[in-house]
Amino acid sequence: MESVGRTRLGKYELGRTLGEGTFAKVKFAKDVETGESVAIKIFDKDKILRHKMVGQIKHEISTMKLIRHPNVIRIYEVIASKTKIYLVLEFVDGGELFDKIARRGKLKEEEARKYFQQLINAVDYCHSRGVFHRDLKPENLLLDTNGVLKISDFGLSALPQQVHENGLLYTTCGTPNYVAPEVIRDKGYDGAKADIWSCGVILFILMAGYLPFEGSNLMSLYKKIFKADFSCPNWFSTSAKKLIKRILDTNPQTRITISQIIENEWFKKGYQPPQFETTEVSLDDVDAIFNESGEATNIVVERREERPVVMNAFDLISTSQGLDLGILFEKQLGLVKRETRFTSKHPANEILFKIEEACKPMDFDVKKQNYKLKLQGEKSGRKGHLAIATEVFEVAPLLHVVEIRKAKGDTLEFHKFFKNLSMGLKDIMWKSQEETSGSDKARREG
């Protein structure tokens, strides 16, 4: 990535936003000393203190430091400014496994087995370190350019000190379609056995292209989970069906264990455990992020850019799928994309002005910072207020890429918002000659 217009954070040069959540955003960055690409997860310190999230953030960092495995996202270091905390993470550029399934539907059994083997090996290692993920799902499984699976997002994970004297956990968390029945019952559960259930759901999705448990509402969904009410498609091999049924056993006491999965004949086919060295990890520096006054002990200064971030050819190719507005809505799993992009030949300031104008009739509060917009819906939707982040990137002096990404709220409502927004931006959205001639032809025929 070019350095013009970047935000500099110590030895790191920040690039485009890769993802955004309620309490953090993740940005691409480059170590200017080594040239290595990294991802930096950025927490707003004031928001963390205000919501009493210090313990949870320390917990997430501690978890990620404990896990050093080739199939788990690695944390390199933790730094802080006066207002923010930065987690410097391994950058994985192959996208989510979730997106691969959304694009292709079901995977071939051999490919599904390869990903499942990597998942089980990583989960087994996490459990050996006393860490239970508790939110395993395809969205939290990333792929590198070589197709190697990497587990991410340990925000809901549990450490040994959270386990009660009876060996059980009591916090109900996770994503409904992937959660084990004993977690829903809220009477205590074994973190390892709950993770195994989620792995079984993931294996089913990889091979089927759809979820094993679905319902029109939470109650109907939970009823199916409690009864393990699912059926395997006829293209599943007999041995795969048997393994999945042993994993999706509603009784955690008789549910197959990870050691038994690794010895399973279907699982063992072509299995090659990764070779890596285990090292002792100190967590002493995690507490040093905050001192008693809540200020960071290791201060870095963030310098802001004064023009749109420059997106070079490599960046453009890596995000090219997002330039096709037709993929905003994916049909295979009833999925709606959480972000989209369009290109424009208009100046960056004009693009931002047009977006602001288009948002006014839709009751959105707009906040501008450099070449970014934060859009906050004034009306509460299905999952609270819809929040959208927008950023303009410069590809060439007369060509910009505009990224529009859901930060909070319901994804279907984001899809509806973008359809309305794009109507107001038709005069600045660049279309290829083929698209233009096609639309002209449609108007003539109409």
Image (spheres, rainbow, N blue to C red):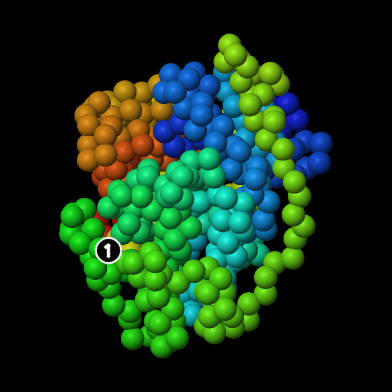
Residue furthest top as drawn: 293
Q: Nearer the viewer, residue 190 or 237?
A: 190
Is 373 drawn above or below residue 126 in the view shown? above
> Residue 284: which quarter of the image?
top right
Residue 47 x/y as whole percent: 46, 22
| Residue at 53 percent of width and 68 percent of height | 258
Residue at image location 65% in from the left, 42% down from the top: 65
The quadrant holding residue 210 is bottom left
Report whether 17 appears left or right of 145.
left
In screen coordinates, is 183 left or right of 200?
left
Q: Nearer the viewer, residue 419 or 443?
A: 419
Q: Quadrant of the C terminus?
A: bottom left
- Which residue ends up furthest to the right in the rendered image? 33
Look at label 1 and name its amino acid: Ile
Location of residue 310 by image quarter: top right
8 to the left or right of 381: right
Query: Residue 37: x percent and y percent?
Result: 70, 45
* Residue at (61% x, 44% y) in the render: 64
Q: Quadrant where the N terminus lies?
A: top right
Q: Is residue 176 above or below residue 275?
A: above
Q: Position of residue 171 (x, y in %)?
A: 37, 43
Q: Which residue is mark 1?
A: 225
| On screen, residue 142 above or below 356 | below
